[in-house]
């Protein structure tokens, strides 16, 4: 009974107030300091017992107790057996609750257990199952992912063993397993194995539950874990969400940790005496064991993980998009004063009006996208040449655009008309810069000095600047302004230091 059990003295007092003094049920409850539903229940029982008020003289309290609470005949022998294994499987289906299953059970046989006993027997059965099978995860809902360690590959040339990581993914409802070895636990490897996992399963879950791995979670936090930007893009591409396990909460990731343990026992133990010389060779062996593991019939329930996956997870999972996710790097930098911004040690031009502003950049294998306030403003073909400048003319300030018609070859051809030293100086000036365009203005300025000082003086000035390795427009201009271009001497040699402690070349000849 859901209501509180009160002493016989209070029961008789309640009946006196209700039936003798005609108190209301609320007044009686308040007077006796008990719940109103309790008074209602005892009034119902008193009426059903056949007793009347006032009670007969000398009526024993035990008789009243028996009349109010008659013993029910045992129905244990006629109650149907609860299909516990069926219940455990049905509970993994989306939107199915234990209350719904109990209602179906009672509808089939009204003499069956009440809900509290039904739930108690179900929970007792769940405790007899393995840890991974007794967690109530809905079909297609969650995929638990993590890395494990313990595998190696051997370099065929040196014989050195290199450790590799084992990515493990376990479906919540069926415990269906996927495993794949990677060279490391970096972001690219992390994304790549997720894509491979979805392709292997031919579907994706509604939610991913990773451990607080740096590749997937930028900042581990119990309440607001910050998801890596690329990992968030993957989640959006496959229309799923990411629920990182809370730090120091092993039950959050128990499914995958148990999966890692099973993978170690089933995969690593069987491969412990084999030597692999490439990741491809190792993963071929792992996949054979993964298929065997998923086809293996479990003790409870008497079916395989593969069969459960196709029955529970696959029908309720997300279908794969038309194209697999393409890995992309994310960076955030400010635009430099030369209207170029760095991405992966390369430099790309943006409109000069964005100088000093911060942009986000997303780089795939083919293009780099530039975003401001989450809106894409332009793209560049991706370059993998380090310290390379990719420049568009329309991004330049108007004062710089007039140099766009010039090329290094054209500038050198023009400089050669004023002398070989002028050409050599300009050539070295452009080679000293990170990209030739940075030297265009200086080179053209040097050539323009011939209009004021003449080609002969410019040739001598460039020759002198080359001698002193002073590669700048300013150094050539100063030489011309001060008339140093007419001086023929070389840089003075530094005199040798005379000292008693210096051995000199004779010492080494004598020895």
Image (cartoon, rainbow, N blue to C red):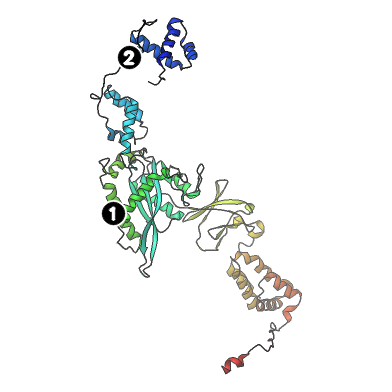
| Residue 84, percent from left and from top | 28, 33
| Residue 266, percent from left and from top | 30, 52
In the rendered image, the residue lying farthest to the left is 77
Residue 313 can be seen in this image = yes
**SS at mark 2 in the image:** helix
- Residue 69 higher or lower than 277, as above or below: above
Query: Which sits in the foreground, 412 or 93?
Result: 93
Residue drawn at x 30%, y 62% is 274
In the rendered image, the residue lying farthest to the right is 482
- Residue 434 higher or lower than 246, as above or below: below
**SS at mark 1 in the image:** helix
Distance Cα–Cα, label 2 vs label 1 = 69 Å
Query: Which sits in the foreground, 16 or 392?
Result: 16
| Residue 64, percent from left and from top | 35, 12
Name the quadrant containing residue 466: bottom right
- Residue 491 higher or lower than 510, as above or below: above
**Where the N terminus falls, by quadrant?**
top left
Name the quadrant containing residue 403: bottom right
First-in-chain label (2 vs 1): 2
Query: Which sits in the foreground, 195 or 387?
Result: 195
| Residue 193, percent from left and from top | 39, 52
Q: How many marks?
A: 2
Q: Which mark is residue 192?
A: none
Q: Mark 2 points at which residue?
A: 66
Query: Which sits in the foreground, 158 or 373?
Result: 158
Q: Name the residue under label 1.
A: 288
**Where the C terminus falls, by quadrant?**
bottom right
């Amino acid at each position: 009974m859901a209501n509180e059990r009160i002493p016989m003295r209070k029961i008789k007092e309640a009946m006196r107030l209700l039936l003798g003094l005609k108190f209301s049920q609320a007044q009686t409850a308040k007077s006796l300091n008990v719940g109103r539903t309790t008074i209602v229940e005892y009034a119902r029982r008193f009426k059903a017992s056949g007793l009347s008020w006032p009670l007969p003289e000398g009526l024993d309290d035990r008789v009243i107790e028996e009349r109010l609470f008659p013993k029910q005949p045992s129905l244990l022998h006629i109650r149907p057996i609860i299909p516990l294994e069926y219940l455990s499987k049905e509970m993994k289906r989306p939107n199915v609750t234990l209350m719904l299953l109990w209602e179906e059970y009672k509808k089939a046989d009204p003499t069956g257990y009440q809900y509290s006993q039904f739930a108690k027997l179900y929970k007792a059965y769940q405790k007899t199952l393995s840890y991974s099978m007794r967690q109530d995860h809905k079909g297609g809902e969650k995929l638990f992912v993590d890395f494990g360690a313990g595998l190696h590959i051997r370099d065929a040339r040196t014989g050195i063993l290199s450790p590799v990581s084992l990515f493990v993914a376990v479906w919540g409802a069926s415990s269906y397993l996927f495993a794949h070895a990677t060279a490391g636990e970096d972001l690219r490897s992390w994304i790549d194995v997720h894509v491979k996992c979805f392709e292997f399963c031919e579907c994706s879950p509604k939610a991913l539950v990773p451990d607080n791995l740096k590749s997937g979670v930028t900042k581990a936090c119990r309440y607001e874990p910050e998801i890596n930007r690329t990992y968030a893009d993957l989640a959006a591409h496959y229309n799923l969400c990411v629920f990182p396990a809370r730090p120091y909460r092993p039950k959050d990731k128990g499914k995958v940790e148990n999966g890692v343990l099973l993978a170690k026992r089933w995969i690593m133990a069987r491969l412990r005496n084999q030597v692999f010389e490439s990741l491809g060779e190792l993963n071929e062996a792992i996949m054979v064991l993964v298929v065997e593991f998923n086809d293996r019939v479990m003790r409870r329930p008497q079916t395989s993980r593969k069969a459960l996956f196709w029955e529970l997870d696959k029908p309720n999972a997300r279908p794969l998009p038309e194209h697999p996710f393409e890995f992309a790097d994310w960076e955030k930098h400010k635009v430099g004063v030369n209207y170029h911004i760095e991405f992966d040690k390369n430099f790309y031009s943006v409109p000069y009006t964005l100088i000093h502003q911060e942009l986000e950049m997303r780089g795939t294998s083919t293009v780099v996208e530039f975003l401001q306030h989450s809106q894409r403003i332009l793209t560049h073909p991706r370059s993998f040449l380090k310290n390379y400048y990719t420049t568009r003319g329309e991004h330049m300030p108007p004062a710089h655009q007039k140099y766009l018609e010039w090329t290094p070859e054209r500038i050198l051809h023009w400089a050669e008309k004023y002398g070989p030293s002028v050409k050599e100086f300009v050539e070295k000036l452009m080679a000293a810069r990170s990209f030739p365009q940075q030297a265009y203005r200086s080179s053209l300025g040097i050539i323009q000095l011939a209009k004021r000082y003449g080609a002969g003086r410019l040739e001598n000035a460039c020759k002198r600047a080359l001698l002193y390795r002073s590669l700048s427009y300013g150094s050539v201009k100063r030489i011309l302004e001060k008339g140093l271009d007419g001086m023929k001497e070389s840089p003075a040699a530094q005199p040798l230091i005379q000292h008693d402690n210096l051995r000199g070349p004779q010492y080494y000849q004598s020895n």
